[in-house]
Image: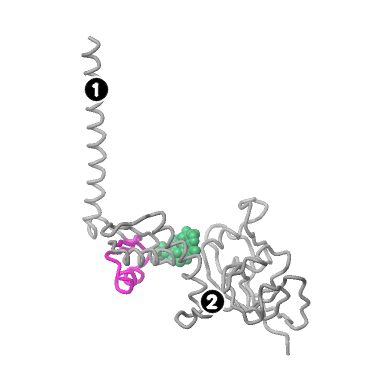
């Protein structure tokens, strides 16, 4: 039998604020007949294996009438949500991909995705190097070995240019990008402080990822738990004030000097 289940998550209604599962999304039970599917030039069919649920997806769920995003793929109501994931090519009419290839790219939140020739993503899939699978689970290729990892690494190393012994503070530290930034920073010899939204995540940051310090920002009472941070902030404010005062006094001295020269 060539007809296969192709369950998918469609957008039921545009979310206002934080999306609600029942209000905004719907699981649809569809089928796909892969063998009978006629593929146009460059089209292919993917069996989706791992899907990354990333924050950027929220940006794609806006009413197009609001003209919120002028580029990128917007999802209309009734359409399958789009995300990034790892898939196996199961049928192809595209010379770049052969059956059995593992690829990473924009797929639907569904079991199988038919990548159409007029879809901008038709040439944007990247190959998963099967050699790497000896050492790394396939799921890693849908998360930190791709954009999440790249974002964390380049933002910390290329933009942040950290130096050994420095202290870094990471917000959203238990999320994909935050936990990678923290771990890379530890490897580079930094002191890592992270904040997150629950005690379980704080425990994870301290005991699994070995952050030097972590706190739950939802219940933080600075003076009780982190007197050093308060001291740090106060010292910084004081230094700024003293600096401003000195500049002000210096300007007065210069003005008096100029006045004296003129007189
Ligand atoms: N993943 C990427 O490739 C990538 C690339 C570029 C930029 N970014 C950006 O980096 C940031 C973090 O991304 P990520 O991939 O690390 O995210 P993630 O793993 O999905 O983590 C998201 C975290 O955000 C916090 N959060 C705060 N308010 C929230 C809310 N209302 N709903 C859900 N989560 C909430 C939660 O942590 P707490 O409990 O600690 O608050 C949650 O765990 C995002 O702004 C994202 O757009 C990500």
Choose mark 2 or mark 1, whichever is in front.
Answer: 2
- Counting residues from the start of the chain, the first of labels 2 and 1 encountered is 2
Identify which residue is drawn at 66% across, 81% down: 99
Residue 233 at x, y = what percent? 26, 49
Helix, strand or loop at label 2? It is loop
In the rendered image, the quadrant that contains the C terminus is: top left
From the Cβ of disc 2, is ligand 1 less than 8 Å away?
A: no
In the rendered image, the quadrant that contains the N terminus is: bottom right
- Distance from Cα at disc 2 to Cα at disc 1: 67 Å
Identify which residue is drawn at 49% across, 71% down: 143
Helix, strand or loop at label 1? It is helix
Identify which residue is drawn at 33% across, 62% down: 194
User: Front-most of 230 and 51?
Assistant: 51
Residue 163 at x, y = what percent? 30, 57
Specify whether 252 is left or right of 187: left
Q: Which residue is mark 1?
A: 254
Q: Which residue is mark 2?
A: 129
Specify whether 23 is left or right of 242: right
Q: For residue 260, which quarter of the picture?
A: top left
Is residue 186 depicted above or below 241 in this figure? below
State if disc 1 and disc 2 touch (CB < 8 Å). no
Magenta stretch: includes residue 122: no
Residue 184 at x, y = what percent? 36, 66
Question: In the rendered structure, which segment of residues is drawn in magenta?
Answer: 192-219
Disc 2 crowd rating (10 Å Cα; few below 14, some 14-19, many 20+) is few
Q: For residue 161, which quarter of the picture?
A: bottom left
Residue 186 at x, y = what percent? 31, 66
Q: For residue 211, which quarter of the picture?
A: bottom left
Q: How many marks?
A: 2
């Amino acid at each position: 039998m060539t007809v296969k289940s192709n369950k998918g998550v469609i957008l039921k209604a545009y979310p206002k604020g934080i999306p609600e599962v029942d209000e905004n999304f719907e699981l649809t039970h569809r089928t796909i007949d892969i063998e009978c599917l006629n593929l146009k030039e460059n089209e292919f069919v993917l069996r989706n294996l791992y899907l990354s649920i990333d924050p950027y997806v929220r940006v794609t769920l806006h009413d197009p009438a609001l003209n919120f995003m002028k580029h990128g793929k917007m999802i209309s109501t009734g359409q399958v949500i789009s995300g990034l994931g790892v898939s196996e090519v199961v049928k192809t009419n595209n010379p770049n991909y052969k059956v059995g290839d593992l690829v990473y790219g924009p797929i639907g939140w569904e079991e199988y995705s038919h990548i159409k020739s007029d879809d901008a993503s038709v040439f944007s899939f990247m190959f998963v190097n099967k050699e790497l699978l000896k050492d790394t689970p396939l799921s890693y290729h849908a998360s930190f070995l791709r954009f999440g990892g790249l974002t964390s690494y380049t933002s910390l190393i290329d933009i942040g240019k950290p130096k050994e012994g420095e202290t870094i503070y990471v917000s959203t530290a238990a999320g994909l990008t935050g936990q990678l930034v923290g771990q890379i920073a530890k490897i580079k010899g930094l002191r890592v402080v992270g904040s997150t939204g629950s005690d379980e995540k704080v425990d994870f940051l301290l005991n699994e990822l070995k952050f030097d310090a972590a706190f739950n920002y939802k219940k933080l009472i600075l003076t009780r738990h982190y007197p050093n941070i308060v001291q740090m902030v106060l010292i910084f404010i004081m230094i700024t004030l003293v600096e401003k005062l000195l500049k002000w006094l210096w300007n007065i001295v210069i003005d008096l000097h100029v006045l004296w020269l003129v007189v």
